[in-house]
Amino acid sequence: MSILSRLTGNALPAVDTATAHQRPRGVLLVDVREPSEWAAGHAPGAYHQPLGRLDAARLPKADRYYVICQSGNRSARATRALCDAGLDAHNVAGGMRAWSTARLPVERG
């Protein structure tokens, strides 16, 4: 059980980086890191919306959202907010650190 789950009493939906990388059509990967982190490297096809500006109503429509940050902490908060807004959202466990460790593709700029 994650720390967030223990604090909120609710399990937070999550996926691993391989699942996020192989996401099917209809799933939007949302990167909630700061612009400098995004520019340093992000997952191909990800949509960028920093956590401080996250607005569920302004996200492109999708069937499901996978949310990623650097380590999984900010994305857990974002996932909780999106779930609370009625969206089907899942946290990407381990974030971009786990993505890089798994040697998944990264785009820069």
Image (cartoon, helix red, strand yellow):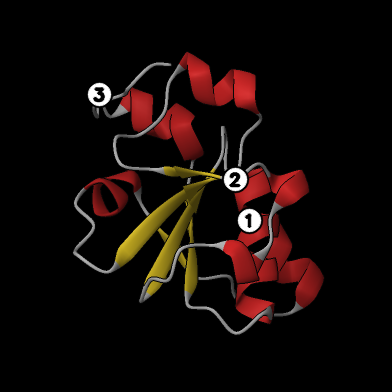
Give how far apart the Cα atoms at labels 2 and 1 are: 14 Å
| Residue type, mark 1 in image | Ala
In the rendered image of this protein, does residue 89 appear above or below residue 75? below
User: Which residue corresponds to the image point at 41% horizontal and 28% vertical from the top-left?
Assistant: 42
Find numbered disc 2 in the image and state the secondary structure of the residue it sits on: loop
Q: Which mark is residue 27?
A: none
In the rendered image of this protein, does residue 41 appear above or below residue 91? above
User: Which residue corresponds to the image point at 70% horizontal and 57% vertical from the top-left?
Assistant: 77
Q: Is residue 2 visible?
A: no
Q: Is residue 31 visible?
A: yes
Give residue 70's position: percent from left, percent from top.
56, 32
Q: Earlier in the sequence, mark 1 or mark 3?
A: 1
User: Which residue corresponds to the image point at 77% horizontal and 45% vertical from the top-left?
Assistant: 52
Total marks shown come to 3
Q: Are marks 2 and 1 in contact (CB under 8 Å)?
A: no
Disc 1 residue crowd, few under 14, some 14–19, many 20+, Cα 10 Å: many
Residue identified by numbered label 1: 76
Find numbered disc 3 in the image and state the secondary structure of the residue it sits on: loop
Give residue 10's position: percent from left, percent from top.
67, 79
Give how far apart the Cα atoms at labels 1 and 3 are: 22 Å
Q: Earlier in the sequence, mark 3 or mark 2?
A: 2
State left or right for residue 106 relative to residue 66: left
Give residue 54's position: percent from left, percent from top.
69, 55
User: Which residue corresponds to the image point at 70% horizontal and 68% vertical from the top-left?
Assistant: 81
Residue identified by numbered label 2: 49
Residue identified by numbered label 3: 103
Disc 3 residue crowd, few under 14, some 14–19, many 20+, Cα 10 Å: few
Image quadrant of residue 82?
A: bottom right
| Residue type, mark 2 in image | Gln
| Residue type, mark 3 in image | Arg
State left or right for residue 74 relative to residue 62: right
